[in-house]
Image (cartoon, helix red, strand yellow):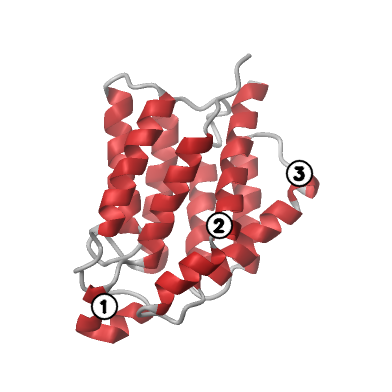
Amino acid sequence: MSDAALRDAEQLVRTIANTAVENERYFCDLDAAVGDGDFGYSLARGFGKVVDDWDAMEYEDISGLLKKTALVLSGRVGGASGPIWGTAFLRAGTALKDSPDPSAEDAVAALRAAIEGIKQRGESDLGDKTLLDALIPATDRLEQEFAGGTNASDALAAAAETARESAEATKGMLAKKGRAAYSGERSRESVDAGAIAIAVLFERVSAAWRPTTV
C-alpha cells in the first residue's frame, strides 16, 4: 500500500468527521421538521469521538481505518443512526480488505457495499425518503464519471452535484422509514435530513479533496 493512498483516505474520513461536527445544529434543525430533532447531535457525538480519538486509533491500512471508524460510530452514535453509519463504514472497510491501494472501481465498490449494509440494517431502499435517496444517485454518478475517464476531483464534484439535487428532491416524497414516517402526509413538506447530510458531506469532501502526490 502506498503511503499516499492511506493519507488520502485519512483526509477523507477527517473531512467527513469535521463536517458532521460543524453541522450539528443544521442537521438537527432539518430533522426537527418531522423527526425528533436529534440527528445532528447523534452524528456529531459519534464523529466528534472519531476526531478526539484520531491520534490514538491504530490501523495499518485503509480497510483498518474504516473499520476502526465504524467501531467508534457504532459505540457513540445514538438511536438508529449508530448502527446504520457504523455498518456503512464497516462494510466499506471490509470491501477494501484486499485493496490496500484502491482504484476508482474499488472506491465505488466500497460505496456499494456501504449502501447494501445500510439497506439491510435500516430495512430501507431507494424511494423510502432516507439518506439512500442521495447516496445511491451520487454513487451512480461517481461510477459513471469514472467509467468515462473523469479524474477523481471532477468526478467527486459531479457526484456532489447529484447528491444535492437528489437530496433536495426528497421534498415532496412520503417518508416510509424512521420517526418521520409517523407524520404521514406531512412528511412531504420537508427534505430528508439524512439525504441533505449526504449532500453536504459530498460537497465538503469534493471541496477539500487534495490527493497526495508521491
Which of 212 and 139 lies nearest the eye of the viewer?
A: 212
SS assignment at label 1: helix
4 up-or-down from 12: above or below: above
Q: CA distance from mark 2 to mark 1?
A: 24 Å
Q: Residue at x 44, y 34 (%)?
A: 107
Badge 3 amino acid: Glu
The answer to whether any part of residue 1 appears in the image is no
Residues marked 1 and 3 touching at CB (< 8 Å): no
Image location of residue 195, percent across then percent down: 36, 59
Badge 1 amino acid: Ser
158 up-or-down from 91: above or below: above
Image quarter where the C terminus lies is: top right
Image location of residue 125, percent across then percent down: 28, 61
* Residue 177: assigned label: none
Q: Would residue 26 be found to the left or right of residue 163 on screen?
A: right
Q: Earlier in the sequence, mark 2 or mark 1?
A: 2
Q: Earlier in the sequence, mark 2 or mark 3?
A: 2
Which of 136 and 71 lies nearest the eye of the viewer?
A: 136
- Judging by the rendered image, the residue that carries numbered circle 2 is 20
SS assignment at label 2: helix
Badge 2 amino acid: Ala
- Judging by the rendered image, the residue that carries numbered circle 3 is 58
Residues marked 2 and 3 touching at CB (< 8 Å): no
- Judging by the rendered image, the residue that carries numbered circle 1 is 187
Image quarter where the N terminus lies is: top right
Image location of residue 152, percent across then percent down: 42, 26
Quarter of image, res 211: top right
Q: Residue at x 51, y 27 (%)?
A: 102
Q: Residue at x 70, y 60 (%)?
A: 49
Which dot, 2 or 3, sits closer to the camera? 2
SS assignment at label 3: loop
Image location of residue 75, percent across then percent down: 65, 66
